[in-house]
Image (cartoon, rainbow, N blue to C red):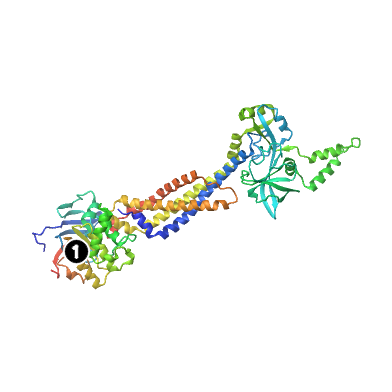
Amino acid sequence: MINLAVRDILYAWGKFIFTGLGLGLLIGVTFTMAGVYRGKVNDAEALLKNSGADLWLVQKNTLGPFAEPSKVHDHLYREIFAIPGVAQAVNVTYVTMQVRHRKKDIRTMVVGVDPGVYAELGQPQYLIAGRQITRNHYEAIADLATGFKLGEHIKIRRNYYTIVGLSRRMVATGGDPMIFIPLKDAQDVQFLKDNTAIIKQRRRTSENPVFNRPGVPGLLDAVITLQQTNHFVNAILVQTKPNYAANEVAKSIRRWKQLQVYTNTQMKKILLGKIIAASAKQISMFLVILALVSAAIIAFIIYTLTLGKIREIAVLKLIGAKNLSIIWMILQQALALGIIGFMIGKIAATLWAPIFPKHIMLLTSDSAWGFITIMMICVLASIIAIRAALKVDPAEAI
Amino acid sequence: MVNANNKRVVFIEGLRKRYGKGEAAVDALIHVDMQITPGEVVGLVGPSGSGKSTLLKCLGAVIEPTAGRITLGDEVIYDNNWKLSNLRALRRDKIGFIFQMPYLIQFLNVVDNVALPSMLAGRTNKEARKQALALLEALDVAHRANAMPSQLSGGEQQRVSIARALINRPPVILADEPTAPLDSERALVVIRILNQMAHQYKTAIIIVTHDEKIIPTFKRIYSIRDGKTHEMTGEGA
C-alpha cells in the first residue's frame, strides 16, 4: 500500500516546508527559552565551582552575597584558620557595576580577591590568557564576555586597571561577566564615596567638638581616616582539608563564630531556589504558552490541510479505504510537520544561541524531551482534523 | 427487457427510501424494481429530485434504504437491513464508481490513482500498478501514467476514473452523469468506452444521465419519476 501521507506531502512540499519553517522558528524560540534557564543554572553552578570554596561564610542571618547584602569584618578570616579542618580562607567582595570601556558601559560583577595568597581560592581557576593578579593594586582579570583584551586599561570608579589575565565562563547569576581586582581596591570600589560627600563628611567631623579636641592632637585625623577606610568584605571563602567533611567544619564555625556558614550544596540551593526561581517560573510560563501556541498552530494547519482534502477523503472512503488508513494519513502529516519543525527549530536555536548576550545552554536531554513533547502535541493537535475526516460522508463524493 | 435466461448481476425489488420522520418525512424512493445482466449498460433518467442519486447511493451502499431487497450477483446485500457488516469492503470489491467530476486524488499520479482500490483490496503495489497500466492501455491513456491529475484534460481524467472504477473487476459500476462536463464528441467517446469495458469485463454499468445526446445510445433505460422506476427500451437496442 502506498503511503498517502508522504505522497500528499511531496505533492504540496512547498506548503509543508514553509509551514514547518514557521513552526520550526517557534520551536527554536521554545528551545532558546529552555536554554536561557539552563544557562542560568549553569552560570550559578559555575560561579560556585569556579570559586574553589567548600564553605561560604557570610553575615549572620543573611543568605550570602548573591542574594542579600552581607558584611563581614576582613580580619575574621585569620581566626577561621584556627578552626580544625580549615585549609584555606580568603576574603572576597562582590559588586555589580557598570564599567566604562571604549565609550561603552559594560555591566559586570567586580570581584575583589586577595592576590597571591591562595590563587586557587576566589580567583578564576583557569585563565585562557595572561596571568593571575600578583600586585595589590590596579591589576585586573576580565572574563572574555566583557570584550576586554590583555594589556588594555579599564576605569573602575576613579582608578585605571590593567588587564593582566583573561578568563572564561566566570559570570554572575544574572549572566554578567566578572572582573577580578585586588581586594583592597575592591573594598574601596564598594564603599567609596564621591569627592563632595567626602569633603562634607570631613567638614562635619571636624566641626564636631568630640572628635576635634584641642587637647588631643591627631584624633581628628585618626577618625577621618577610619571613616574613609573600609574593613568589610562580603564573604569569606573556606577550603577544607582533604580528610574533613565540609558539613562538620561548617558546624564548628557556626558554634565558634557569629557567622552564617553555607556549604556548596546550601549555596546552590539559595542560588537556584531564591535567585533564579522567579526567572525560572517566568521561563516555564513562556514554555507553556509557546507549547500551547505551537499546538494551536499545528492543529490549525492540519485541520486546514484536512479540510482541503474533504473530497479526496470522501472518495477514499467510497472506494473502500479504512478509517484507520485515513487517520494514519492525517497523523503522519502532523508528525511530519512536527519533525520538520523540530529539525528547523533545533538548527535555528543552535545557530542563534551564540549571538545572545547571555549564556544559552542547549542540552541534548532537553532536545529529546522537546522532541517527545512536540510529537505528543502533534498527535493531540491532529485529533480535531481526524474527527473532521471521520465525519466525512462517502456520499459527498457522489 | 432482460432475458430471463441471463444471469442477473443487479436485482432490486421494491426498494424504498424515506428521509426524515413523522410529518417531515420525504419519500425519495417509493418502489424501485431493477435488474441488470453482466456486460449490460443501462441508463437511469429522470427529472431533478426524482430520486436518481438516492437510488445510486442506496445501490452503492452509501446510504441505507428503508425497505426492499438488493441482490448483487448471488449475494443478497440488503433485505430490509444490510446483510453485510463491512460495507466498505463491499464498495471496494463489488462496486465501481464514476462521478460527474472525475474526483481523482490530486496528490497521486495517474497510475497510482487507478491502482489505489486494488492496493486497498490487498494486492501488492507492483501487482496493482501492473493491472492499472493494463487498464490505462485499454483506455488509451497509458502515456499519461506518470502525470498528475491536474496535468490531464477533462476527457483524460474521466478515462482515468473509469479505469479506477474497473480495477477491482466489480460486477457493477455506478456512473453519475459521467459525461456532464464533456462536450458531445468526448461524451460519446466516454460512452463508447464504457460499453466496450462492460462488454470486455462483463461488468454491468448503470449510468445516471440528463444528457440527451447519450440517451439514444442505451439499449435499456430506467426512467424514475416520483420515486418509482419504469423500464423502457432505448434507441440503442
A347 relative to A173, above or below:
below
Q: Is residue A370 left or right of residue B191?
A: right
Which quadrant holds residue B141?
bottom left
Q: Residue B164, how many percent across, how many down?
A: 25, 60
Q: Residue at x 73, y 48 (%)?
A: A161
Q: Residue at x 81, y 43 (%)?
A: A201
Q: Residue B9, how many percent across, how many down?
A: 15, 57
Q: Residue furthest right?
A: A215
Q: Residue furthest left?
A: B5
Q: Nearer the viewer, residue A322 or B209?
A: A322
Total number of numbered labels?
Answer: 1
Q: Is residue B70 left or right of residue B153?
A: left
A258 relative to B100, above or below:
above
Q: Is residue B191 left or right of residue B146?
A: left
Identify the secondary structure beneath mark 1: helix
Q: Residue at x 33, y 63 (%)?
A: B148
Q: Nearer the viewer, residue A57 or A386?
A: A57
Q: Residue B220, how many percent across, how many down?
A: 14, 66
Q: Residue furthest front?
A: A130
Please indicate, yes or no, whether residue B99 appears anywhere in the rendered image.
no
Please indicate, yes or no, whether residue A82 appears anywhere in the rendered image.
yes
The amino acid at mark 1 is: Met
A85 relative to B188, above or below:
above
Q: Residue A364, how many percent across, how many down?
A: 49, 45
Query: Which residue does the numbered mark 1 point to in the structure image?
Result: B197
* Quarter in which the C terminus of chain A is drawn: bottom left
The numbered mark 1 sits on a residue in which chain?
Answer: B
